[in-house]
């Protein structure tokens, strides 16, 4: 079976490898030559030099998996792809797109006889070895066409992938997944910060994290990562206290407001990331000046 992959970043390249090692023939393209060259020599993966070549080399009703950044990059790729596609072809968007954009794209493409699957993908850099969790949105026929590929990409043929619902449902599920991820990460980070603050107890946070991995209620892959990091360097020397955020966390917080469904943990975790990026510095300066104004408290200077 053939599949085309557009976008060969960390996720796209490893998905190409996993599909090829699972028995698929993969035709792949990325405008970055270095990304294409990184797949040179991978059996059953052939990199082509343009979208026209990618579409021309795929046979029958084509399946193309896009692993591109959400937004303008995806929109530009779709505009370039559309004239090259034919009725019955299936586009799978594995980027972290906003679910309402996915609903719109599915409608627009269906009017041209094209099928569209919005695929929320989780698994990161470990997906090649362990498989990817796939949350799929689209019509039953679209999912049926993509199913053989989903079975290879997922951790198991019968587990780790799900047809979540109609167009938009896959990316909606991934958005909420990432909001939950923010909250879980924040809770672990705060807990270990409290442990580190009690220097009088002399906690070995790396060993404690390793202990929690076995039988505790909080055991998880995120805890596994904490244990690995803290056992290597529990002081986290050289790491800047800045955490970036992706669109999904913001979208999840906005969705809670639109629906009127309280999500304080997800929202506060997002606010903490904003704070780490320096966006609360102005407010903190003003707080210091207010304290000086009403109480004569000293103001620290840079």
Image: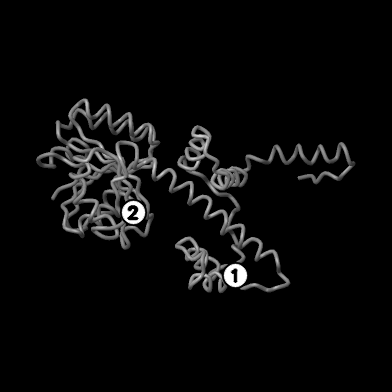
Q: Quadrant of the C terminus?
A: top right
User: Mark number for residue 133?
Assistant: 2
Residue 125 x/y as whole percent: 37, 57
Q: Is residue 136 left or right of residue 201?
A: left
The number of numbered discs placed on residues in the rendered structure image is: 2
Residue 94 x/y as whole percent: 32, 44
The residue shown at (59%, 45%) is 268
| Foreground of the two, 145 or 229 | 145
The residue shown at (58%, 44%) is 264
Tell me if label 1 and label 2 are in contact, CB under 8 Å. no
Q: Spot the residue most to the left.
A: 60
SS category of the residue bearing label 2: strand
User: Mark number for residue 43?
Assistant: none
Residue annotated with mark 1: 205
> In the displayed structure, would residue 285 be above or below residue 187?
above
| Foreground of the two, 11 or 269 | 269
SS category of the residue bearing label 1: helix
The residue shown at (32%, 31%) is 76
Q: Is residue 23 left or right of residue 265?
A: left
Marks 1 and 2, Cα distance to the nearest angstrom?
A: 30 Å
| Foreground of the two, 110 or 262 | 262
The residue shown at (27%, 51%) is 37
Residue 293 x/y as whole percent: 86, 36
């Amino acid at each position: 079976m053939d599949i085309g992959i557009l976008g060969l970043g960390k996720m796209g390249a490893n998905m190409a490898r996993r599909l090829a090692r699972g028995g698929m023939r993969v035709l792949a393209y990325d405008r970055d030559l270095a990304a294409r060259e990184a797949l040179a020599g991978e059996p059953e993966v052939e990199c082509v030099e343009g979208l026209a070549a990618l579409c021309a080399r795929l046979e029958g009703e084509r399946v193309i998996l896009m692993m591109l950044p959400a937004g303008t990059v995806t929109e530009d790729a779709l505009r370039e792809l559309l004239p090259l596609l034919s009725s019955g072809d299936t586009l799978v968007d594995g980027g972290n797109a906003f679910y309402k954009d996915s609903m719109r794209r599915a409608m627009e493409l269906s009017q041209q006889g094209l099928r569209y699957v919005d695929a929320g993908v989780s698994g990161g850099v470990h997906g090649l070895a362990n498989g990817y969790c796939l949350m799929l949105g689209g019509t039953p026929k679209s999912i049926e066409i993509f199913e053989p590929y989903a079975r290879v990409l997922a951790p198991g043929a019968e587990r780790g992938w799900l047809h979540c619902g109609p167009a938009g449902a896959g990316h909606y599920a991934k958005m909420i997944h990432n909001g939950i991820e923010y909250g879980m990460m924040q809770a672990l980070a705060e807990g270990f910060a409290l442990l580190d603050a009690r220097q009088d107890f002399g906690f070995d946070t790396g060993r404690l994290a390793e202990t929690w991995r076995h039988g505790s209620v909080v055991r998880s892959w995120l805890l596994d990562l904490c244990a690995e990091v803290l056992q290597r360097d529990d002081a986290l020397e050289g790491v800047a206290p800045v955490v970036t955020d992706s669109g999904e966390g913001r979208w999840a917080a906005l969705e809670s407001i639109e629906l009127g469904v309280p999500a304080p943990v997800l929202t506060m975790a997002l606010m903490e990331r904003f704070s780490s990026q320096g966006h609360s510095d102005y407010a903190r300066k003003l707080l210091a000046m207010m304290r000086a104004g009403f109480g004569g408290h000293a103001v620290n200077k840079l």
